[in-house]
Amino acid sequence: MNTLRALMQPHRIALMLVFGGIVLWCALALRWDWIPVYAPLALEGLWRTVWILVITCVLGFLLAIPLGLAQAVGPWYLAIPARSFCTVIRGTPLLLQIWLLYYGLGSLFPQFPAIRSSELWPYLRQAWPYAVLALTMSYAGYEGEVMRGAFSSVAKGQLEAAKAYGMKRFTMFRRIWLPQAIRNVLPTLGGETILQLKATPLVATITVVELYAVSSKVRADTFIVYEPLLLLAVFYLMIAGAITLLFRRFERRGTGGARLKSADVRT
Amino acid sequence: MTFKKTFAAGIATALLSAGIASAQEVKIGIAAEPYPPFASLNSSGEWEGWEIEVIDAVCTAAKLECVLTPVAWDGIIPSLTGGQIDAIMASMSITEERQKTIDFSDPYYNTPAVIVADKSLEIEPTPESLAGKIIGVQASTIHQAYAQEYFDENSELRVYQTQDEANQDLFAGRVDAIQADSIAMADFVNSDAGACCEIKGAVASDPAILGRGVGAGLRKGDDDLREALNEGIATILADGTHEEITSRYFDASIYSE
Amino acid sequence: MDALLDILGLTEAARLLSLSPPGWGMNLLRGLVNSLQIAFGAFGMGLVIGLFGAYGKLYGGPVLRDLLAIYTTVIRAVPELVLILILYYVGTDLINKAATMLGHGRVEISGVVAGIWVLGIVQGAYATEVLRGAIQAVPAGQIEAARVFGMPPFMLMRRVTIPAMMSFAIPGLANLWLIATKDTALLAIVGFNELTLETRQAAASTRAYFTFFLAAGALYLIVTLCSGVVFGRVEKWARRGQPSLREARR
């Protein structure tokens, strides 16, 4: 009810009318006749975008836990590599990382003819393993930094209490430390996932056919410039909206007690 | 409030004055990627190659002041229609599909489309022979259009942003074959990276897709520029400049009526 | 020196990266200068948009606030690559149409300016949020006190709000600057000769993909690390006179 009332203010109604007018104009004045032809391909691309997003976020997060832990409490020979990894990933453009992995590694293949007869070759020929690897490392790099803060911010007293109860180190990590660290980062995860979504179109440059690549194909085939891009932007807006809603639900379920603001975790 | 306005106005004028130069010169759009032997950037940061010299000669003959403007290949037509460039001279074939959107000058060279693949691979440039193979093509080219029409059914297509990326993946072995212009490919198979591969032959002709030679792309209705460029092309063809440039790059003529 | 390179097997890489032809080092550096120029311009433009945006969001009318909310939401949800393409083509198209209407004929927009304006609009959305947060963090009493003394709004902004919010804004702005430097790489996709595209051209011409991509990565990393040092100094300066964070927490 409240949201409805908020929408019903006079200026918002006027804005919505203007907005509706723009949408109507777009629908009538621009060319959309290509949509039925490319709809199946677009759905395939959408599926691939979502698939890459989910896989790389999950894998990246799993990788971020040891990265964060190593930086927060690890001995120097683990902390320094973890820290350097995060710095390098965060300090260079993702596009460059993707190209380095795909074309850089590819340029080395001919020097090792044995690769072509190995069992990995069918995968090395495809583009998606490189895309998944690059995006996973990127997510791990950014989230590893966040996890470092999250692990350090779990109150020492809790860990001491667990120790006093004679908990084994791994049990303590599994039952006390990790759950609390994850609860701390939960509010930032939604934002990080949207950033990851925004990174997915870059893999189109190494021939992975995801949503963005489909729009490029439409542009190339039909010479229509703006319409596919506008529709693409709407698609990404909707996916980002879905991510926000999903994480809001997670957060409501996941954090019963006190919540840390994202700003606190990111220090 | 007045401060804000002057501030904003100042920023705007600073941006505009920095960006708007005189509109007298003709901006020739070329693809911002190495496409030897036609156009590539050398280590001194200058563009060189057959097509670059031809652009120079045509502009001189047509008395135009031309500026080379590299843009991304897959956005080269929007750049033209959007006004970032005034003409495209980037080995673009004159096709019916493109003529719906842009105009073309007369052609200034022709090149058949060929299939290139590893020497050890025994294939013919036919859909049957390429069945089950991975074929690389450059996006927004006649080759992509052709491959989609004839090879898409039985082979897997990989679409690359630039030709050199497709070449690179042929070299790396990620694709079995590529379809591209014969002249550029002749240059590629003679290079170190292309030594793996050879030209397997020209694909079956389809003028509707493969077009009739390479010409300069122009905005629709830009007739003055088109006539000027046509005149320039005719001049260098007639006075031997075209032949002279060609002889420095190729063994045979690459122009036919 | 040569012997050392020989031992490390880097002779070839050193030859390719040398600053004079046939080395491609100069091309990379020229790309880096272009990248930095755009990053700088876009960051500056983002700050200007951000400042107006933040003031608009905090003190503007309901319509302005809603429009700004749409602006920041859309920009932050749509991939930069898509935004760059839309803004790049639409922007130049619109400017050209406007110029023709005013009777100027076509105008040329240099790649640098197009890059700055495209990335600047993207940066502006993030800067709006950063600066809004920072302004809100300034204790309201300080601003009220200045008003009571009869300070005109602009003087209030210059003397009170901006200096007081600086220390809150700098970490966020430092982050934005890093995003700006890295986002310039995306302009490679519209064919602008910044560091990443120069790198790819060099790599494709010489087939030394690994060498050049690693070299470019090192250049970006140097920029990032140097920026970190500079922003650390700036933050220290902005916090002068304030208790350090650690003391404040106690």
Image (cartoon, coloured by chain):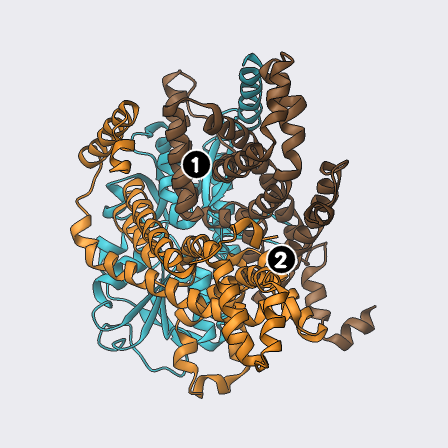
Chain colours: A orange, B cyan, C brown
The residue pinned by badge 2 equals C216
> As drawn, is A93 to the left or to the right of A14?
right
> As drawn, is C6 to the left or to the right of A140?
right
Tell me which residue sits at (57%, 82%) in the image: A168
Q: Is residue B187 visible?
A: no
Tell me which residue sits at (72%, 54%) in the image: C20
Q: Chain of mark 1?
A: B
Residue B257 coordinates in the image, percent (x, y): 31, 49
Q: Say which quadrant the N terminus of chain B sits in.
A: top right
Residue A190 coordinates in the image, percent (x, y): 42, 55
| Type of amino acid under label 2 | Ala
| Type of amino acid under label 1 | Ile
Disc 2 to disc 1, C-alpha distance: 29 Å
Q: Is residue B6 above or below residue A49?
A: above
Secondary structure found at label 2 = helix
Residue B123 coordinates in the image, percent (x, y): 31, 79
> As drawn, is C44 to the left or to the right of A224?
right
